[in-house]
Image (tube, grey):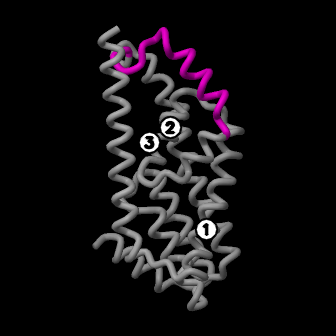
Amino acid sequence: MFLDLVLEFLSTLQGAQAYAGVFVLLLLCGMGAPLSQDMILLAAGSFTLIGTMQPLPLVLVAAAGLLAGDAFGFWVGHDWGAKWVRKPWAANFVPPERLPAIEAGVRRYALPLSFVTRFLPGQRSTLFFLAGTFRMPYRPFLVGDGVGALLHAALFTYGARALGWHWQALQAPFDHVDDVLTAVLAAALFIALWRRRRR
């Protein structure tokens, strides 16, 4: 219902206001707003069919909004998460002796991790926060996520235009994928904690 209201409002905007609306909504999604970036991209792509926005400017603005939202969570991780993970209470989740190896791995695979994370619905904000927490460098994050954001925005914009993708039809499958990914991440965390306790 909330998404319906937001998209109905977005459909009333024209020109620069419409682009600004898409940017702000995608930024807010990255900051934790209870909205789906994918559904907003699909709806915005469909608006290009009625002339509210043009495809190429929409792709560029949408990619900037996606990157800005991701960068917020990444910055919070870098600025605050990296301090929290070194607190005594955090040793229950991340043993201090393993932290250097985790950070080295994150640095080593920073660019592909950033790129792939952009295409994981529902998990992006959490994973980018963790990437910042484990001190992933800014440059490969911005490059990997920036390229991913451009491809993501283009895929959904031109998918809505050329293939007739509708957010209403795809919302349930995306919600299902989100549930599966959440279950997989929760299972991986549980297994990691169980193995550490056994050792």
User: The N terminus is located in which quarter?
Assistant: bottom left
Circle 1 sits on which residue?
Answer: 155
Say if mark 3 contacts mark 1, CB within 8 Å.
Answer: no
Residue 168 at x, y percent in the picture: 38, 76
Q: Distance between the residues labelled 3 and 1?
A: 23 Å
**Of the image marks 3 and 2, the number of the one nearer the N terminus:** 2
Where 138 falls versus 124 (above or below)?
above
Residue assigned mark 3: 126
> Quick check: 57 left or right of 188?
right
Q: Is mark 1 on a helix, strand or loop?
A: helix
In terms of secondary structure, where does tag 2 sit? helix
The amino acid beneath tag 3 is Thr
Q: What residue type is labelled 2?
A: Val
Q: Does the magenta stretch include residue 102?
A: yes
For marks 3 and 2, give the CA distance: 11 Å
Please identify, in this view, whether the residue under mark 2 or under mark 1 is nearer the observer.
1
Magenta region: which residues?
91-111
**Residue identified by numbered label 2:** 76
Query: Where in the figure is residue 135, as x and y percent of width and height?
Result: 58, 27
**Which of disc 1 and disc 2 is earlier in sequence?**
2
Per the model, the C-alpha gap separating discs 2 and 1 is: 28 Å
